[in-house]
Amino acid sequence: MTVPPEFLLTALLIELTPGPNMAYLAALSLAEGRRVGFSAVAGVALGLALVGALAALGLAAAIAAEPLAYGVLRYAGAAFLLYLAWEGWRGADGEAASAGRRAAFGRALMTNLLNPKAAVFYVTVLPLFLGPPGPDLVMRNLVLVAGYVAVASAVHAAIVLFAAALRPYLVEGPREMLVRRMLALGLVFVALWFFMETRQ
């Protein structure tokens, strides 16, 4: 099965819409540089792939349909973004060490595993492109998930490259503390936006 171009276009439009991944990757790449940003892109990709695999097996639909499970993910996701904002604020004072590539990967992975909106996307949008039921339904699901992850990773990599290119002009030097704190406050707003946007 090949991925329909219409699905790839849908995935692209969704990924170009501002959201937690876009804000986090831009802030991280400005603060820590391109290599750390790309590590986070890999974490996001793995998170999206795992959620997609759960959707293909039917588990994501169960989570989306269960208010308690959905709510727990929603609160945990918003709390984790606030934690990242607090870490960024502390890092502005030099009290916290640089995140590092491994930590950036883990945090990006966790952010996506705690994002119920990703599960809802797979449950609501993928069936529109799957075609009739059949023995290969799970495989068709996984092919679409792979296509979505590929599009998302390309968009995220472009965000990292753009933010890293701006880093010498915005972050390095005497403006570093101010920019880092502004990015931390930006993540707070993203956490609040995420919490409101994921209401069922």
Image: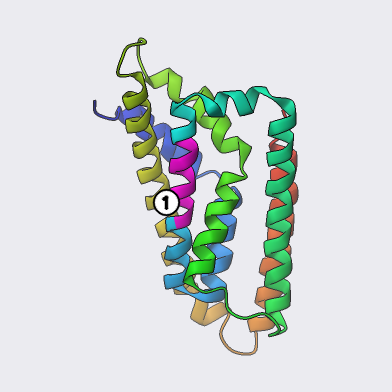
Q: Please, what is the three-letter code of the amino acid marked with disc 1?
A: Val
Q: Quadrant of the C terminus?
A: top right
Write the residue at 69% across / 53% down: 190
- Residue 182 appears in the picture as rendered: no
Above or below residue 115? Residue 26 is below
Instruction: Identify the residue at image location x=43%, y=36%.
Output: 11
Q: Secondary structure at mark 1?
A: helix
Q: Which residues are magenta?
A: 43-52
Quadrant of the rendering where the N terminus is positioned:
top left
Percent from the top left, x then y, of residue 89? 72, 73
Q: Does residue 141 appear left or right of residue 93 in this picture?
A: left
Percent across and percent down for residue 74 are 70, 40
Q: Which residue is mark 1?
A: 155
Q: Main secondary structure of the magenta part?
A: helix
Q: Position of residue 63 (x, y in %)?
A: 62, 28
Q: Where is residue 38, by image quadrant?
A: bottom left
**Residue 3 falls in which quadrant of the image?**
top left
Eyeballing the image, is 57 above or below 24? above
Q: Nearer the viewer, residue 94 or 71?
A: 71
Where residue 160 sits: x, y (%)? 45, 63
Q: Is residue 157 left or right of residue 173?
A: left
Q: Is residue 117 above or below residue 90?
A: above
Q: How many marks?
A: 1
For mark 1, does the 10 Å Cα neighbourhood hold few (<14), some (14 to 19), or many (20 or more) residues?
A: some
The residue that appears at 53% across and 80% down in the rendered structure is 169
| Foreground of the two, 152 or 166 | 152
**Residue 143 in view:** yes
